[in-house]
Image (spheres, coloured by chain):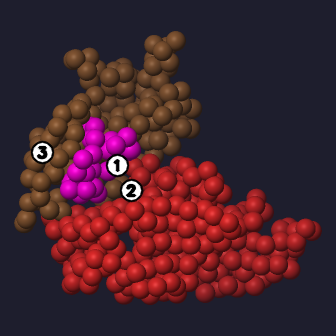
Chain colours: A red, B brown
Amino acid sequence: MALALQTFSTVKDANAALQAAGTRYLGGGTLVVRAANEGDVSVSSLVRATEPALSTIAVAGDRARLGASITMAAIARHPELAWLAPAARAVGGPAIRNMASVGGNLFAPAPYGDFAVALLALDATVITEDGEAPIETFLAGRDTSRSIVTSVTFALPRPQSFRFLKVSRVKPKGVSVLSIAALLQRTEDGTITSARIAFGCMADRPMRARATEKALLGCRLTPEEIAPALAAANQGIAPITDPVASAWYRAEVLPVHLGRLLLA
Amino acid sequence: MAKVPVRFTLNGSEKAEFIESGATLLHALRDKIGDTSPKGGCHQGTCGACSVIIDGELRLSCLTLAETCDGADIRTISGLAAGGVLHPLQRAFLDAFATQCGFCTPGMIMAAKVLLDRTPNPSRDEVVEALSGNICRCTGYEPIIQAVLTAARANSQNAA
């Protein structure tokens, strides 16, 4: 099915055009063109914006800003984002990574959207034409959002404080059984003083693991001390079922992989 | 459907076409221009059969809208052989029995070409990673991996 595509040089103009019924924003195309190819008749026209800021990575001081059109491949090869590269490389094969964008990943339904899981753990701020929102708020309302995402920003984590794991059955590239991102602040003796844990595939979109985060406070990363946190991992989750794995399987293996990530 | 003018270079030749707005590059190449070497497999970005090289990067033509390629340099496997002589990757795929039904082969070879252009002597793991977006249901992957490694060795011997 062919669609009319409108290209605008500014986000503002594209955002105005996006308000028309049946109109979707075209980022990398891996979601919306796929939907159109699949016969999604709710999409009748596409808009895109070519504003240069959408394609800019800025790492300055203690913060990073990723333009919404930045691809997973661009993040994976950026020298100052090497710590984030595993999350970017978790998205599809090489061709997909050359197309899939930061902005699009925020809208990817489970089992996709692994990079958004990383952004959730990083407590990113999502910037749209309408303003700024914490990523958790943005993800909760993404189904009704009609404002173009222009960028995401986040504080650069301390060295070795960010961890990411994607579990798939087909190696090296496959659809997620689950993904986990963790941002841990620790004292010199290894005691955890702050924890942000995000899960992918444990709901229809990335979610915080609040019970696990709470249970990790005051622990060191030993099998004995993290055991309560692993036991709490299944609290509040509603895993998806798809051809890759059932909800039951995802829930069963979640604590195992969380333990491996924390003890790595 | 409105038609839009699109100009790009396809395998070194200038192309200027009027293309339906919103049409995919795969559709434009196969049905408008007549280059049927990229194959339409899943149309979902999963199989990699439609892989082409756009401005030096591997892309999926089934998920790329043609009009976003205005001014781009596009390479498909139909432009790989030079003067009737197969590209080393094409020769290696034949010699290593890496081609069976052949449907996945154009995408596989374009993915491998990007790899060898950037990494002339890849490790086996790098080959596996480079081909990880391309699905083959006939050969299994080992002959394909061996073909890419063979082509890389041939390249390095020729360069020596």
- Residue A39 placement, left or right of B99: left
* Residue under numbered circle 2: A99
Viewer-nearest of discs 2 and 3: 3
Q: Amino acid at mark 2?
A: Met
Q: Secondary structure at mark 2?
A: loop
Mark 2 and mark 1: Cα distance apart in space: 7 Å
- Eyeballing the image, is B106 above or below A148? above
Q: Amino acid at mark 1?
A: Arg
Earlier in the chain: of badge 1 and badge 3, it is 3
Instruction: Provide the residue designation for mark 1.
Output: B59
Q: Left or right: B44 with respect to A208?
A: left
Q: Quadrant location of the C terminus of chain A?
A: bottom right
- Of residues A71 and B45, the one nearer the viewer is A71
Q: Residue at x 90, y 68 (%)?
A: A188
**Quadrant position of residue A218:** bottom right
**Residue reaching furthest to the right:** A189
Whether residues under marks 2 and 1 lie with C-beta atoms below 8 angstroms apart, the answer is yes
Q: Is residue B67 left or right of residue A57?
A: left
